[in-house]
Image (tube, helix red, strand yellow):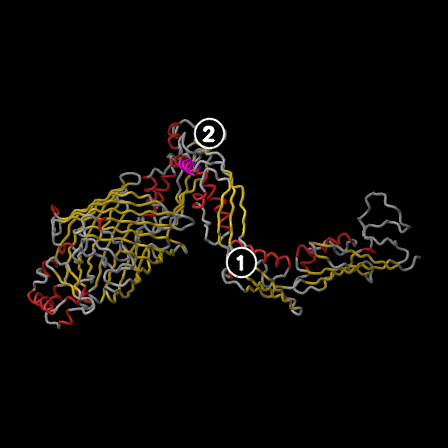
């Protein structure tokens, strides 16, 4: 017997630059057993060791002497031992192996990152075999992360760069990554002198770390020079203008490298014909005090290319959609012109879209340029595979809940979206538009082609989502500057009987002689044709206000500068498409207006004291026979003048007409309009994502139609919608109008004339607040103008499917007959503000605040508003 021989094996290794604690494998080998201290297979016979023959050793039976009997983990505080067991290869019942134990330590360290020290203790078991104990020292957890010293960069942006997380395991690698990311962010924003110190406060008892990033931002670097190297043909000044990075501005590394170097300069060169321009690189140089930055940009302009020849390789079927010459005519630039890559790419996209619009959805247009550098020519081979047209096989309609299928089917059939017709993308866009315009009960329209057994035929599935409610019922009230306290009730149905009939009944009652009664009806089809019919009955009575008039000048209060406007009547209109995007409509209107004018309160001023007649601050307005007013400065207004005004009031010569002469007047008119509508609805009837809607109209009143008011109105209206990115929309609306009348008395038609101000024209002003500017003599015309122009600009940002926010800027002006040429008197009135657009119960409610910059004879001020219905 050799007796008892103690043996120890020590293994030390390094991982990721961190030395792992050596582990010691201690065991006893009894006499009569092999003295080989290596782990692994042993000879089957208990004889003297023999040299290995290299043959595969038998492993089917594990020697009890070297078997792992138990595995333990010590030092574990927050981790589950069962999880750790899955990470090691050493298992109970296996033969112990130093190679596997080494891999186990590596796995526990690398795969978890939770331990700072790992050791393995191997001891002889009392029952034979070995007990393996992993001695673990858990890394501390991050208790808190603080950033101090930052003033220029937001704490949120800095925290987003920190890869350490509270309550997670701390590691030096994550600390280093966080520091580097913060430093990089500062460099990107131009703070190249930033200094960052990381404080690591360890709590041994809790085994936690408190991490503090202390930042000294230093000055932000400004750009002192931008130089170009290799720009032989393009002046450096022109190149600088195309960059967003500018001399004198703070340096932004991302803006410079990603936009200017990667996009702006390259595109500018290529648009000038330098198709193979290369931005070779750039260098940064600092001034001596490290606060200024000089940028040197090296370019290789290459040749300025001209389009040589276009070679058209056209693959068609039986039907040729576009001839080779037609395709050449659509290409831009033409042969012999400077090669502008942006213009060329745009023409290719348009050519592809033109094929799609003709139903050739499988068409492919692939340009292949060949650059002849020696002759500075680019010869382009255009490979056009026309493909086959797609024939519609079947058109199933899905998703309808209340609407009858034939109401949808008639729109599709009218546009030839039916079996055996060509699948035309342009027609699908028009169908979606018309379906949305049936009413707000349509929430979404989607066309999905699906395969059939025939590759040239597709089923076209029409998916429609309807609003859960198509009717409205509301009772409410509020306070308005014109109507005072009022109550309102509305009931309506946008999809009556599932046939897209629209019915609406509204009533309002206010304290200031204010009431409204309206009934409206509409349908998109009559007589089995896409001819729409709309009608309305109305009886409205409310206060309206004069602005900068006698009442305002004399400071007579609310009732002095307002009048009662009472209108009742009816209108009916019909319209239908006369071409793909062109629509024609005719409207007949018959109404009468009853006004209680200012004459009542003017005569009531006769017996008032002079200090009630004359406004001390502003002077007084003098009224002539035509109803125009001149504001006279109080300093030049004598007692004799005051007595003269009172005398004229007594004798009723200040305003010769009596109130009754203008209290009942009627309008009977025909309006003819033609419009083009290409609006693209994707999510809502009230929020077009693209396209435009434009119309011109002519209204004729009087003459053979009878009635009191004789006039002619000409109006042009246009709205454009652009989708710059995501679901944002930039919307532009403009309207211009001109009115002719046989009457020379403006008062006869003042409610038919043009005014601005209010929620649908220029926001930030009261309704009808904006009237023509005073003429050369200083006379005001509060009776409206015969010419008008205004524009609305909006940027709409969706918050949710129901809520959209918008910022707006409105401007416009009104002119009267004293200004025959409007371009000689431009004095636009401006308004700006914000708006929330909420879709509910099939309606659009608009809440907003506008600021009027140019209020006449009033200080600029803001104004809240609320209304139902879209502005444009």
Indicate the position of residue 215 as horizontal and vertical percent values.
56, 62
Q: Is residue 184 above or below residue 51?
A: below
Mark nearest the camera among 1 and 2 is: 2
Quadrant in the picture for the N terminus: bottom right
Asked whether, in this view, residue 786 is left or right of residue 722, the answer is left
Indicate the position of residue 788 as horizontal and vertical percent values.
23, 51
Magenta range: 340-350
Q: Which residue is mark 2?
A: 379
| Residue 337 image-quadrant placement | top left
Indicate the position of residue 515 as horizontal and vertical percent values.
21, 62
Choose the circle earlier in sequence order: 1 or 2.
Answer: 1
The residue depicted at 49 percent of the width and 43 percent of the height is 228
Disc number for residue 160: 1
Q: Secondary structure at mark 1?
A: helix
Residue farthest toward the right in the current orientation of the protein? 1
Measure the alpha-carbon separation of dots 1 and 2: 50 Å
Q: Are marks 1 and 2 in contact (CB under 8 Å)?
A: no
Q: Is residue 680 above or below residue 376?
A: below
Residue 91 falls inside the magenta stretch: no
| Residue 457 image-quadrant placement | top left
């Amino acid at each position: 017997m050799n007796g008892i021989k103690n043996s120890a094996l020590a293994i030390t290794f390094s991982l990721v630059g961190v030395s792992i604690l050596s582990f010691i494998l201690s065991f006893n080998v009894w006499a009569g057993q092999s003295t080989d201290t290596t782990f692994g297979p042993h000879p089957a016979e208990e004889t003297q060791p023999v040299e290995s023959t290299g043959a595969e050793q038998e492993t089917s039976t594990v020697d009890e002497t070297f078997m792992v009997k138990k595995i333990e983990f010590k030092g574990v505080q927050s981790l589950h031992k069962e999880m750790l067991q899955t990470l090691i290869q050493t298992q109970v019942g296996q033969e112990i192996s130093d190679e596997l134990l080494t891999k186990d330590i590596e796995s526990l360290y690398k795969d978890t990152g939770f331990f700072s020290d790992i050791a393995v203790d191997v001891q002889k078991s009392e029952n034979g075999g070995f007990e393996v104990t992993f001695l673990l020292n858990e890394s501390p957890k991050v208790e808190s992360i603080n950033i101090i010293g930052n003033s220029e960069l937001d704490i949120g942006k800095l925290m987003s760069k920190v890869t350490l997380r509270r309550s997670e395991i701390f590691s030096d690698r994550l600390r280093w990554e966080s520091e580097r990311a913060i430093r990089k962010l500062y460099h990107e924003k131009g703070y190249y002198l930033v200094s960052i110190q990381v404080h690591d406060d360890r709590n041994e008892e809790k085994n936690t770390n408190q991490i503090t990033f202390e930042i000294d931002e230093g000055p932000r670097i400004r750009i002192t020079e931008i130089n170009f190297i290799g720009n032989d043909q393009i002046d450096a000044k022109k190149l600088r203008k195309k960059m967003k990075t500018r001399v004198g501005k703070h340096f932004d590394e991302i803006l410079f490298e990603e936009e200017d170097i990667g996009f702006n300069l390259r595109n500018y060169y290529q648009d000038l014909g330098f198709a193979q321009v290369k931005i070779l690189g750039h260098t940064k140089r600092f001034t001596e005090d490290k606060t200024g930055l000089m940028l040197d940009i090296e370019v290789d302009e290459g040749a300025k290319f001209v389009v040589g020849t276009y070679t058209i390789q056209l693959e068609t079927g039986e039907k040729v959609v576009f001839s080779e010459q037609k395709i050449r005519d659509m290409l831009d630039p033409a042969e012999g012109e400077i090669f502008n890559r942006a213009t060329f790419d745009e023409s290719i996209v348009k050519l592809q879209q033109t094929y799609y619009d003709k139903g050739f959805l499988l068409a492919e247009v692939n340009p292949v340029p060949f650059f002849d550098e020696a002759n500075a020519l680019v010869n382009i081979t255009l490979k056009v595979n026309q493909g086959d047209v797609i024939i519609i096989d079947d058109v199933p309609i899905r998703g309808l809940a209340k609407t009858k299928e034939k109401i949808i089917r008639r729109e599709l059939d009218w546009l030839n979206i039916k079996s055996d017709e060509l699948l035309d993308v342009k027609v699908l866009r028009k169908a979606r538009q018309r379906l949305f315009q049936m009413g707000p009960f349509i929430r979404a329209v989607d066309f999905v082609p699906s395969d059939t057994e025939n590759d040239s035929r597709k089923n076209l599935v029409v998916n429609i989502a309807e609003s859960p409610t198509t009717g409205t019922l509301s009772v409410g009230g509020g306070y308005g500057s014109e109507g005072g306290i009022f109550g309102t009730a509305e009931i309506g149905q946008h999809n009556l009987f599932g046939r897209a009939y629209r019915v609406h009944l509204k009533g309002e009652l206010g304290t200031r002689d204010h009431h409204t009664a309206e009934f409206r009806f509409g349908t998109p089809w009559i007589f089995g044709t896409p001819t729409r019919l709309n009608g309305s009955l109305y009886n409205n009575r409310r206060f309206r206000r004069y602005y900068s008039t006698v009442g305002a000048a004399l400071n007579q209060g609310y009732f002095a500068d307002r009048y009662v406007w009472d209108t009742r009547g009816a209108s009916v209109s019909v319209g239908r498409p006369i071409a793909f995007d062109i629509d024609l409509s005719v409207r007949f209107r018959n109404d009468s207006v009853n006004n209680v004018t200012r004459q009542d309160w003017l005569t009531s001023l006769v017996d008032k004291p002079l200090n009630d007649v004359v406004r001390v601050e502003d002077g007084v307005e003098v009224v002539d026979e035509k109803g125009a007013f001149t504001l006279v400065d109080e300093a030049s207004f004598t007692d004799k003048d005051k007595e003269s005004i009172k005398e004229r009031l007594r004798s009723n010569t200040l305003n010769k007409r009596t109130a009754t002469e203008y209290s009942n007047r009627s309008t009977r008119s025909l309006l003819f309009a033609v419009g083009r509508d290409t609006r693209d609805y994707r999510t809502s009837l009230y929020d077009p994502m693209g396209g435009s809607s434009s119309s011109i109209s002519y209204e004729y009143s009087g003459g053979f139609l009878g009635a009191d008011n004789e006039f002619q109105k000409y109006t042009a209206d246009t709205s454009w919608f652009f989708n710059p990115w995501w679901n944002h929309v930039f919307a532009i609306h403009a309207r211009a109008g001109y009115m002719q009348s046989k009457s020379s008395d403006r008062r006869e038609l003042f409610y038919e004339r043009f005014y601005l101000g209010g929620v649908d024209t220029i926001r930030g002003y009261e309704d009808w607040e904006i009237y023509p500017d005073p003429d050369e003599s200083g006379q005001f015309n509060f009776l409206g103008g015969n010419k008008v122009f205004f524009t609305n600009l909006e940027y709409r940002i969706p918050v949710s499917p129901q809520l959209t926010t918008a910022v707006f800027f409105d401007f416009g002006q009104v002119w009267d007959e004293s200004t025959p040429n409007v371009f000689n008197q431009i004095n636009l009135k401006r308004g700006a503000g914000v708006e929330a657009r909420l879709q509910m119960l099939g309606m659009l409610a608009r809440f907003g605040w506008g600021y009027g910059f140019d209020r006449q004879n009033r200080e600029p001020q803001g104004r809240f508003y609320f209304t139902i219905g879209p502005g444009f």
